[in-house]
Image (spheres, rainbow, N blue to C red):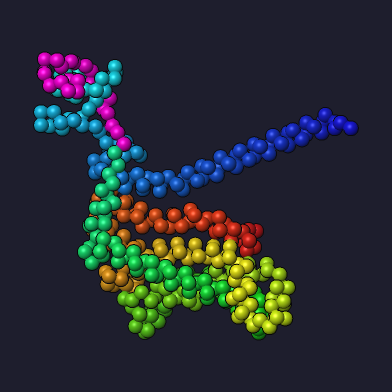
């Protein structure tokens, strides 16, 4: 039995409208991605430029350097004529004309006069990789070419991730699976703490750390992670809620304690959510600037974020080196997110946050 022509036309229009909708959606996503990625590409491009390229107008996106040759003991720019001949300018002539000599020719008698507007300056892609080595060399000697801030950052990041994973997952398990008086009330209070601005708790936390004698140490930068995070607790609790209760009941029948059930059965089942928490904890700890600014005084204890701030104050006018240093600090975060974004997205979408 054939379908009526009106129905076939309706289906064709519906498919065409769906294709148009998908095309518009993809175009919007591509445009949005370009808006976010262009600043990073400009940062990377600037980190490879020479000083004279920083002042060029209009700005150059790709670091192109003028091709030069040594003639008569002087460096001269190389140009191309409309015929494609590579020449150098031997002198200026009236009326906007110049005398040019082909490359390899030094006899002034063989010079030709051409309009200056007909010449095109020859440029080639020549990145200045020395910006990266000089950025490390210009750091203070006590930083050991950036190794000291790098070690401090790795130390803080590793402890922060371990503390956040353990404390947040354990607390989330207690809120999701264990029954105890006031559980739901305490969970609401926990969520309410996310509404407090960081500026409200900054001074009380500083006074606590000063009373403990932790100022100018790395402890204030990683110790709070062992107390958990409200958002991460909520994220992991939502994931725990999706796991069937039959698994825990079977573990109880086999004589498993609540902590053993949490450690050996539940944790392996929430790996996607743990991966998402790990990525967010890594990025937050690696890029933490306010904490070192408040608690750290000694240069030997500075992490990369604060070392970059000091570098900007000392060499802010040298844009190439500053952008190179920024790229070196940013690169680990980009690599981690690039290789783990699948686990991050999976962990977020499987926790009930997708709406």
In x, y percent, where is residue 92?
A: 15, 22
- Magenta region includes residue 130: no
Q: Would residue 187 be visible to someone looking at this image?
A: no
The stretch of residues the image draws in magenta is 101-125
Q: Is residue 82 above or below residue 183?
A: above
Drawn side of residue 342 relative to residue 161, left or right: right
Looking at the image, which residue is at 40% across and 48% down?
40
Res 66 quadrant in image? top left
- Figure quadrant of the N terminus: top right
In x, y percent, where is residue 127?
A: 30, 42
Drawn side of residue 32 relative to residue 245, left or right: left
Drawn side of residue 159 relative to residue 18, left or right: left
Looking at the image, which residue is at 14% across and 23% down?
90
Front-lying residue, 320 or 74: 74
- Magenta region includes residue 103: yes
Res 4 quadrant in image? top right
Res 111 quadrant in image? top left
Front-lying residue, 180 or 55: 180
Looking at the image, which residue is at 69% across and 34% down?
16
Front-lying residue, 139 or 318: 139
- Figure quadrant of the C terminus: bottom right
In x, y percent, where is residue 246?
A: 73, 73
Q: Residue furthest front?
A: 254
Q: Would residue 289 be visible to someone looking at this image?
A: yes
């Amino acid at each position: 039995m054939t379908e009526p022509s009106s129905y076939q036309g309706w289906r064709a229009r519906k498919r065409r409208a769906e294709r148009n909708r998908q095309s518009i959606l993809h175009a919007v996503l591509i445009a949005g991605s370009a808006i976010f990625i262009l600043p990073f590409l400009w940062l990377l491009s600037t980190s490879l430029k020479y000083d004279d390229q920083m002042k060029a107008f209009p700005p150059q996106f790709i670091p192109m350097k003028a091709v030069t040759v040594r003639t008569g003991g002087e460096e001269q720019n190389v140009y191309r004529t409309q015929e494609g001949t590579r020449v150098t300018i031997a002198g200026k002539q009236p009326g906007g004309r110049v005398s040019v000599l082909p490359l390899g020719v030094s006899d002034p008698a063989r010079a030709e006069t051409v309009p200056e507007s007909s010449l095109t300056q020859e440029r080639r892609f020549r990145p200045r990789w020395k910006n990266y080595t000089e950025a490390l060399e210009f750091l203070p000697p006590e930083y050991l070419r950036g190794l000291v801030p790098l070690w401090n950052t790795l130390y803080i990041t590793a402890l922060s991730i371990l503390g956040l994973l353990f404390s947040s997952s354990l607390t989330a398990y207690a809120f999701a699976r264990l029954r105890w008086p006031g559980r739901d009330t305490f969970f609401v209070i926990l969520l309410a703490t996310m509404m407090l601005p960081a500026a409200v708790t900054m001074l009380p936390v500083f006074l606590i750390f000063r009373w403990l004698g932790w100022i100018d140490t790395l402890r204030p930068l990683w110790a709070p992670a062992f107390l958990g995070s409200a958002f991460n607790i909520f994220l992991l609790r939502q994931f725990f809620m999706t796991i069937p209760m039959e698994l825990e009941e079977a573990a109880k029948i086999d004589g498993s304690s609540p902590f053993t059930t949490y450690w050996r059965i539940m944790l392996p089942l929430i790996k996607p959510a743990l991966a998402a928490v790990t990525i967010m904890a890594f990025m937050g700890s690696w890029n933490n600037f306010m904490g070192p600014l408040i608690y750290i005084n000694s240069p030997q204890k500075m992490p990369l974020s604060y070392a970059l701030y000091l570098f900007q104050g000392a060499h802010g006018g040298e844009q190439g080196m500053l952008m190179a240093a920024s790229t070196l600090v940013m690169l680990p975060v980009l690599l981690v997110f690039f290789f783990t974004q699948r686990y991050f997205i999976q962990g977020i979408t499987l926790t009930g946050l997708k709406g």
